[in-house]
Amino acid sequence: MQTDVENMDLAIGQARRSLAEGGIPIGAVLVADGEILGVGHNRRVQEGSVVLHGETDALEAAGRLPASIYARSTMVTTLSPCQMCTGAVLLYGIPKVVVGENRTYMGAEDLLRDHGVEVVVLDSDECVQMMQAFIADNPSLWNEDIGEPDLPPSYEQVE
């Protein structure tokens, strides 16, 4: 059976794949009973999708599963899950979420905990560095991904 750290390595590989494809470097893995059910990465840019975050892509890759499988599964994600991905975890009754990092973005971890989901934050420097570099290089795309308005352009005052 793989550890949370080993599963995170798979999620990081998915994040790197997304970045190589021109997307946002967030990866996820859905695991149950030591078996990888689905892997995914943020494909919003690549597919022109509004919903293909890493977690939702991993759920899609896993396909339809009975509730009993979700009830013993773990979602492993490189970044703290947003409200949409948190909703998917809650909807399917996934009891544990392993987060690579939440320093660059704090998702809805409190909502997960409030609903009894175990949240484990690994605080991976590799995940932090990947997201910091991406956000610095692509601030508008990042704001779009998390549903934040883009910052207005700076205007020099004309005298």
Image: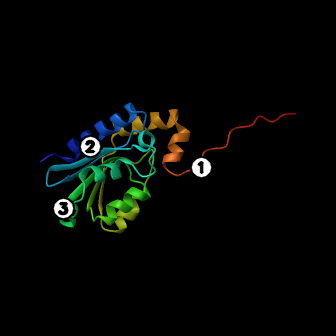
- Indicate whether 4 appears above or below 92: above
- Secondary structure category for the residue under label 3: helix
Disc 3 + disc 1, Cβ < 8 Å: no
Tell me the distance, in whole angstroms, between the alpha carbons under discs 3 and 2. Answer: 20 Å
Q: Which mark is residue 8?
A: 2
Q: CA distance from mark 3 to mark 1?
A: 38 Å
Q: Residue furthest bottom?
A: 115
The residue under label 3 is 69
Could you tell me which secondary element the residue under label 2 belongs to?
helix
Which residue is at the far left?
1
Which amino acid, by three-letter code, is at mark 3?
Answer: Ile
Q: Amino acid at mark 2?
A: Met
The quarter of the displayed image where residue 14 is located: top left
**Are there few (<14), some (14-19), or many (20+) residues within 10 Å of tag 3?**
some
In this view of the protein, which residue sits in the foreground, 27 or 52? 52
Crowd around label 1: few <14 · some 14–19 · many ≥20 (10 Å): few
| Residue to which mark 1 is pinned | 149
Element at label 1 = loop
Residue 23 image position (x, y, % from top left) = 42, 37
Task: Classify residue 115 by image quadrant.
Answer: bottom left
Q: Earlier in the sequence, mark 3 or mark 1?
A: 3
Please state which of the two labelled residues, at mark 3 or mark 2, is closer to the viewer. Answer: 3
Residue 11 appears at what percent x and percent y?
Answer: 28, 42
Q: Position of residue 38 (x, y in %)?
A: 24, 49
- Residue 140 found in image quarter: top right
